Amino acid sequence: MNKQEYMNQLKDRLKHLPKEDFERAIEYYEEYFADAENEQQAIEDLGSPQEAAEQIIRDIAADYSKEDVKSVRTGLHALWVMLLALFAAPIALPLVFCGAVLVVACMIVAWALLLSLLLAGACAVIAGPLSVIAGFTVLSKSIPVFLTCTGFGLLSAGIGAAITYGAYLFGRNFFVWMLRVLAGLIRKGGRNDEAKTQS
């Protein structure tokens, strides 16, 4: 790698910095290369462009954290650099773990929601005939109450049956989708492992 390739990679990794910080960092590295006697030795001293970019972002974030916020623009620049520093830090493994926990939590929530829909539908199906029976017990006293209880009972049974059947179809399709996703992840992981062992 020569100086030009190094600087191009560094610029690419720093392009999201605020303009002033970007220009200051690039100027520093240009001067460093200009003062260096041996280009390859300078590259070895600086490390990879990725390491240099991560260090620059961390340093700028540290500088912003020490300064008082003088304007909204400066505050937004500081926040942006802090976010870049956070994502440049070596925290990939904990982020992957958090992502996996989040996916599992979403699946648990989806299954809990599905179970609650099934139970609500089943309760409505059971309450429907009971309401019709209750209507027959008051038939001799009040025909409007009988008709109301019978109507609500039939409506409840119908809505409950529809909810139960819809929850069953959704659950079956969600389960099949979840199995496909997991199988795809396992296959993808297996291909990555094979690629690593072959290289």
Image (spheres, rainbow, N blue to C red):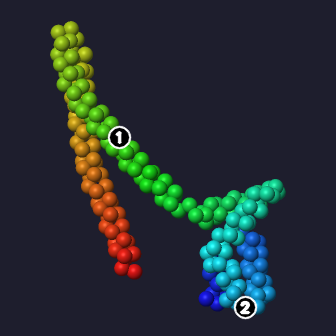
Q: For the point 31% across and 55% down, which residue is it?
A: 178
> In the rendering, at what x and y percent does residue 147 appear?
22, 20
Mark 2 and mark 1 lie on one chain; the one further toward the N terminus is: 2
> 111 or 158, which is in the foreground?
111
Q: Which residue is mark 2?
A: 38
Quarter of the image holding residue 123? top left
Q: Is residue 83 above or below residue 45?
A: above
Q: Point out the residue furthest to the top here.
A: 141
Q: Is residue 184 above or below residue 195?
A: above
Quarter of the image holding residue 53? bottom right
- Give the Cα distance between marks 2 and 1: 65 Å
> 177 or 7, which is in the foreground?
7
Q: Is residue 69 above or below residue 143?
A: below
Q: Which residue is mark 1?
A: 112
For marks 2 and 1, give the one nearer the viewer.
2
Q: Which mark is residue 178?
A: none
> In the rendering, at what x and y percent does residue 126 appear?
22, 27
Asked whether disc 2 touches disc 1, contact meaning CB atoms under 8 Å apart, the reply is no
Number of labels in the image equals: 2
Q: Is residue 193 visible?
A: yes
Q: Secondary structure at mark 2?
A: loop
Q: For the point 82% across and 55% down, which residue is it?
A: 68
Q: For the point 30% across and 33% down, which residue is it?
A: 120
> 69 or 29, which is in the foreground?
29
Q: Amino acid at mark 2?
A: Asn
